[in-house]
Amino acid sequence: MSFHSTAAQLATLAEGEGGNHESLSPFVTGGAALVILLLLLWITTRFNRDR
């Protein structure tokens, strides 16, 4: 199976699926990811007090 035929099949599959869900907002998803990462950073800095 060549790279070109595999890429064409994957592109066809992606077009059929759509890929976006109506209830998922990119701003909410990005904001939630930012909050989670900041929380993990805060937790990491609390455990690393010896520096």
Image: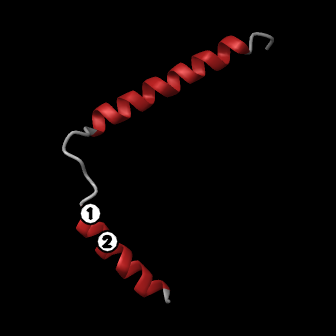
Q: Is residue 14 above or below residue 41?
A: below
| Distance of label 2 from label 1 (alpha carbons) | 6 Å
Number of marks: 2
- Which image quadrant for residue 28? top left
Please say which color scheme the image uses.
Answer: secondary structure
Of all residues shown, which one is farthest toward the left?
22
Q: Give percent across and percent down for residue 44.
A: 66, 20
Pointer 1: residues within 10 angstroms few (<14), some, or many (20+)?
A: few
Q: Which mark is residue 17?
A: 1
Pointer 2: residues within 10 angstroms few (<14), some, or many (20+)?
A: few
Is residue 49 rendered to the left or right of residue 2?
right
The residue singled out by tag 2 in the image is 13
Residue at 36% across / 81% down in the picture? 8
Q: Give percent across and percent down for residue 2.
A: 49, 89
**Mark 1: secondary structure:** helix
Is residue 21 rendered to the left or right of residue 11?
left
- Which image quadrant for residue 50? top right
Is residue 4 rendered to the left or right of residue 11?
right
Q: Amino acid at mark 1?
A: Glu
Of all residues shown, which one is farthest toward the bottom?
1
Tell me, yes or no, whether the two marked residues, 2 and 1, touch with CB atoms within 8 Å.
Answer: yes
Q: Give percent across and percent down for residue 19.
A: 28, 56
Residue at 71% across / 14% down in the picture? 47
Q: Amino acid at mark 2?
A: Leu
Residue at 29% across / 75% down in the picture? 12
Residue at 29% across / 39% down in the picture? 26
Quadrant placement of the C terminus: top right
Q: Is residue 11 above or below residue 2?
A: above
**Mark 2: secondary structure:** helix
Q: Is residue 41 above or below residue 19?
A: above
Given residues 36 and 17, the one toward you in this image is 17
Q: Give percent across and percent down for residue 34.
A: 44, 28
